[in-house]
Image: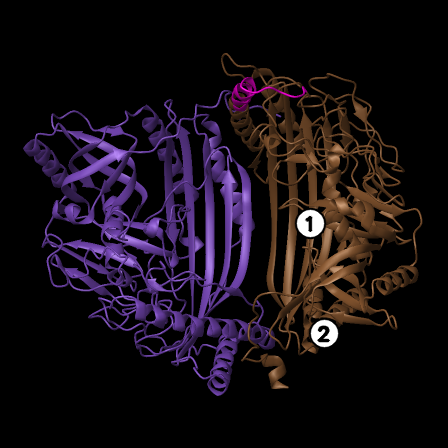
Chain colours: A purple, B brown
Amino acid sequence: MPHRRRLLCFFCLVLLLSVGFGGGGALRVAADGRNGAKTAPPVAKSVVLTALEEELKRAQTILKAKSEQPPYFISYYVTDSDSMSVTGEFGAIRSSDSNRIRLLDVDVRVGDYQFDNTHPIRGYGFFTPSRSIPIPLEDDLDALKSTIWLETDRRYKAAVERLIQVKANQAVKVEEEDKSADFTRETPSATLLPTVAAGVDRKAWETRVKALSAYFRQFPDILDSNVSFFAESSNRFLVTSEGTSLQHGSNEARVVIVAQTRASDGMDLYRYEVFAARTADRLPSDAELTKTMEKMVTDLKALKAAPVVEPYTGPAILSGRAAGVFFHEIFGHRIEGQRQKGDDEGQTFTKKINQAILPEFISVFDDPTLEKIGDTDLNGFYKFDDEGVPAQRVKVVEGGVLRNFLMSRLPIQGFDKSNGHGRKSPGFRPAGRQGNLIVEASKTVPEAELRKMLIAECKKQGKPFGLIFQDISGGFTMTTRNAPQAFQVTPIMVYRVYTDGRPDELVRGVDLVGTPLISFSKIIACSDRPEVFNGMCGAESGWVPVSAVSPSVLTAQIEIQKKPKSSERLPILPPPDATEKK
Amino acid sequence: MPVTKLRLLVFALCFSLVAVAPVRFVRAEGSPASAATVPADDVVFRATQDELARAVGELQLKDFAKPYFVEYTVLESEGCAVTGTFGAIVNASSGRGRTLLTQIRVGDYVFDNTEFAGPSIIPTSMVEDEDYFALRRDIWLASDGAYKQAVESLAAKKAYVQNRTQKENIPDFSKEKPTVAVAPKVSLSFDQAAWEAKIRTWSALFRNYPEIQESSVTFRSTAANKYLVNSEGTRIRQPFRYMSVDARASVQAADGMSLQLSTSFRVNDPADFPSDAEVEAGIRDMAKNLIALRAAPVISEHYVGPVLLAAPAAAEFVDNYLASELSGQRPSLIEQERSEGTQFSERLNRRVLPLFLNVYDDPTQTTFNGKKLFGAYETDDQGIPAQRVSLIEQGILKGLLMSRRPRKNMGNSNGHGRLGGSAGVSAQYGNLFVTATEGKTDEELKAQLISLCRLQNLEYGILIRSVDGQGDPLMAYKVYVKDGREELFRSATLGEFSVRAMKNEILAAGKTPTVTNYIAGRGFPIGYTIVAPAMLVEELELKPPTGTTQKPLLLTHPYFDKK
């Protein structure tokens, strides 16, 4: 490819995952939702769930009879996904695909809840990746069942082998600091919710995407651009030997618009916009999308002419969306349960329960049960997590004091229950992950007042200007000990706000960097207007849809560094003439 | 449009932007005479030609040369795949894709930026739509990148050469006449529901074999069109059609060893696809073979001695050991530090095979004994018309397969520059024919195997009927000297074999060569064919399996458990 596509790193690549992909909002709603008072019609059990249940029973019986060390836990988890994606570029379809797949994840555990084969082996890095098995798309009971048993056998043998390794590792290494168990005990969930079906007209979207993407034809400066539409209907089926038997479905849809130009010094400049909705019909109209594209082109023209900023530390305002990403990276990833365990982890907050870690006017909670805020759908909405535990609102920080972690079924010292945050994408082991991370301030000021406070703070520090981070594309953080405890956030629209009353000035070429503990201590004030950032978050358990909600935040000190830049010249020849009649 | 029915049209007009040489027109044998020019309504031709004109005329960095040669290859393909297991569909996918390969050469034919370090053909993706403007944008940006890279490579190559003495001064690129050959396009048309129904039926056949643990049947259909447009005036459009059904299954033997077999039905013309009954019979045969293999004994000791390779196994043998030796591709400058080419390439006019064997490559031949050949093409991937090339005559190496990369004493292409591999285009075979002048019947070959073993005091010889992709035996038999009985065994691997040994160790070959078709290429299909007879080899080594195997399964198949 002559020019990089999918350049946008969305959100939080924990653990140094280096590549992100376009993806923004993705709203999920279980189809049973909102039938409130009315009695829901009885939901039929799907053939998939029946196949899983029958095979699980059979596997338990046979392994109990034939093996010396039968498993104490088996689970079958099927993700049935029907997705489509259409990308258009300068008025033409670049790609248009649809994909239907049913993936089975098998988990077999030997040992017991306290100590089992999933226990980390120290000195050998992270746990081994799991894998998914494609199973029939059709509801043929015999065919479905024929694909489950072999994988169960393989995983059982692998589990027995690993438990032996785990025991040996325990014997040769020093005692572990955190002596918590390997698996939480939970109340089984037996809930049948209706499944969802895709109902999106791909041909109609191809026409829309073509027409929308043609907008950029008239701008020779736009080197690369595209308009993508994505829709997915997923049904999930989970059966465990503990008695969980769960079936639920959700839809998501989004439009992503990307445009790129290059400054004369070779710096590639991007604008991107994501619109996420629960279903395709809730996405913005063509008129609204076109208005967005107009703004993107205007922004890119301004960025091209904008000066490159030098490294700087000083006061800044992070807009609500920027602050959302900031909190997601800097804070959200550090309160995920499994990061409190293990000698490799930085454990920034592990020992800080009931201690003040944020200013006392800030509270943070993660609430996957929240479908939307105002009219904006939230990406991190779900009813059950990927271990079958019902989603729960978790108060993480109350009045600046750390209270809780985001828990999967991996216990940590002092926390022996999941709180419904065990999430993953197919093929991965679940981990504690964020859903809808919401930052609230008890003491707020209007946006205009926050700006005045910024200027005052600059004057106090003797700085000629402060910064406003208006829009942001994503970021990443490292939480392990062998890397610096740092985060980076990638802003797109950054302005200098001068203390002498000059108009604000757009600048380019900066990344926001920092370390968590220092950054928290510098927060001065919050605005009264929360904003939503919908995105996809990639970490050790795969990609999951998330939201971050925050008001604008004024901090006394942030640090920016120069963005890496390409040294490519502009193309030698002008682009082909779009108006040429051929 | 199947390859064998390609209609390569004869053109009345020379359509070239830079007419450096008379244009060569290609006409397929037996094709109906029809005249045409490069079709004016073909958007891909229009977009590539218009950007080509700009690249040749205007693409230039200050103080650097313009390109002396520009070539665009556009690979369009649409395909679908349906996989079923145990009577149900597991995956049904379809997709389209269009890839642009850009080659920009700066310098001149004698010394240019290519064949130094790294590939000189740069692949980029293109829009799927027939949109003139969007296609031109893709070509514009790709050309810009390719030209800048070419300028840098040429400078680096000049610097490299300056510091070294060169043994010989062979040009980098051959001068050839341009070709215009435009065949009708193909597109994918098939009845998805009907094929899904067939896949359900065929994959459900495995419900009859309780020994089989895992199985799948996959249907694939691809329609591809290849365009070639270059600054010398070459204009080519060539279709390729491919359809296949592959069935695979696995069992676990009593000792825990896992065994797989597969069977394939492949055609390059959907009209040739075997009947349902034939496919069903083929799948059942495969299942039965696999079950027989499961019960067969493991080869327990090393075997070193005569081996009879039945025709399909011999084709794989030819592909693994002989075929790559016949390429006359001169290595790039950096690669020359390590090797000067294949072992054969320095042995022209010397004997490399027994006197009774002849080898030639003929991409112009579309069928053999009524079977279609996948390696047939009218023009190669550099636009050079396909030619029959005699490679080995009565055991003597007479020629090599050539692309537009010249070698010593071979200044021109013989129409074998083919896409594939990491190097972009290189000299490779199309339809490789191995024939024997004193061919023997299967019975005669078996008798000769037995008598050889008797001479060496061996209890048995080995007959290999089929091999896997690595060349290791799948269906292989001990042939007892005493009574000629054939006994199936499993799990042997083939020892090392040197191509030099072919000269003396192939003792006899069969009368009737058989056709083995291959498909390679990621995304875009590239066909190859080997036509070879059975071969009796004086000495091959077969090794028993090493390493550990899984314990037998604890769980049982739910379907057969129930019964």
Pointer 2: residues within 10 angstroms few (<14), some, or many (20+)? some
Which residue is most to the top?
B63
Disc 1 element: strand
Image quadrant where one finds the C terminus of chain B: bottom right
Horizontal side of B254 relative to B390 (left or right) equals left
Disc 2 element: loop
Seen at 68% across and 23% down, the residue is B173
Image quadrant where one finds the N terminus of chain B: top right
Q: Are marks 1 and 2 in contact (CB under 8 Å)?
A: no
Q: What is the number of the mark on residue B257?
A: none
Q: What is the number of the mark on residue B296?
A: 2
Instruction: Provide the chain ID for the residue under circle 1.
Output: B
**Disc 1 from disc 2: Cα separation:** 38 Å
- Going from N to C along the chain, the mark reached first, 1 or 2, is 1
Horizontal side of A444 relative to A220 (left or right) equals left
Nearer the observer, A531 or A49:
A49
Q: What's the residue type where badge 2 is placed?
A: Ala
Pointer 1: residues within 10 angstroms few (<14), some, or many (20+)? many
Nearer the observer, B166 or B25:
B166
Q: Magenta residues?
A: B153-169
Seen at 37% across and 36% down, the residue is A271
